[in-house]
Image (spheres, rainbow, N blue to C red):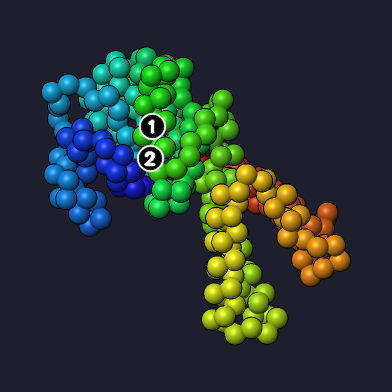
Amino acid sequence: MGTALMQGWLARGLPASSILIQEPALSAETAAVVSQHGIRAEAAYAALDAPPAVIVAAVKPQVMDQVFAPLAKLAGPDTVVLSIAAGRSIASFEKHLAPGIAVVRAMPNTPAAIGRGITGAVGNAHLTAAQKATCDALLSAVGEVVWVRDEGLIDAVTAVSGSGPAYVFLLAECLAEAGRAAGLDAETATALARATVSGAGELLHRSPLDAGTLRQNVTSPGGTTAAALAVLMRDADGLQSLMTDAVLAAKKRGRDLGQ
């Protein structure tokens, strides 16, 4: 995700000289970007000529304390820390920082890799309007950005959009399997399901209409779509009930992991 963000920044014209990477073992993908653009990358920085404007924390949450503790010493009073680590609270960064430093907790999703992600973000009480605008610009390099009013809502953001791509991929899997149950061969069923899910998603992206209206536009009274939707929209065990249960389960798990 960090590399996807960096590629977005470079594509939008951020000078490569503005980026410093701290990483003891670059991935092949990141190493290629670093080499192509001449970006400075070190295993660790003991000191910098000046405090960075932004520190982007983009490592696995399990190693964040180990990585961030020495990195926090590079922050100045005007630095903003931008975390994209799942489940790591703002307080977990503040404990390593001097008082008064701004922290933003953000949750992108995997379509960021193709510039079509969406990120939920929240800042601490020290975040200035200018710092928020900077973080918004950095995050919007890979898609849309939605700011929420308090950190407690980030678990809900994670449950909807952070985990959401997996729900859509599962829909494609289930639709293909249903096609096979209806008599299609596996290759045809998979091709139909994949193109239908991706095409419908693109239509939703481009259309000014909401999802409910688009659904109604496809549904002729008494037709085949209406017959299928009668099953999917059952009150007790329909898709809405399942999706709500799934999102609430993901939200609870996110809260548990953050404790």
* 182 shown above or below 96: below
Q: Is residue 73 above or below residue 190?
A: above
Q: Is residue 204 left or right of residue 54?
A: right
Q: Residue at x 22, y 44 (%)?
A: 23
Q: Residue 201 in the image: x percent, y percent?
A: 57, 56
Residue under the image location 21 percent in, 35 percent down: 15
**Which residue appears farthest toward the right when viewing the image?**
222
Which secondary structure, mark 2? helix
- Tell me where residue 47 sits by quadrant: top left
Disc 2 marks a residue whose amino acid type is Ala
Query: Would you say 93 lies left or right of 188 here?
Result: left
Q: Residue 141 bears which disc, if any?
A: 2
- Element at badge 1? helix
Please give the name of the residue rendered at 60% of the width and 85% of the height, measured from the top-left corner. Answer: 185
Report whether 229 appears left or right of 151: right
* Residue type for callout 1: Ala
Residue 66 visible in the snapshot: no
Query: In the picture, residue 97 is in which quadrant?
Result: top left
The residue that label 1 is drawn on is 137
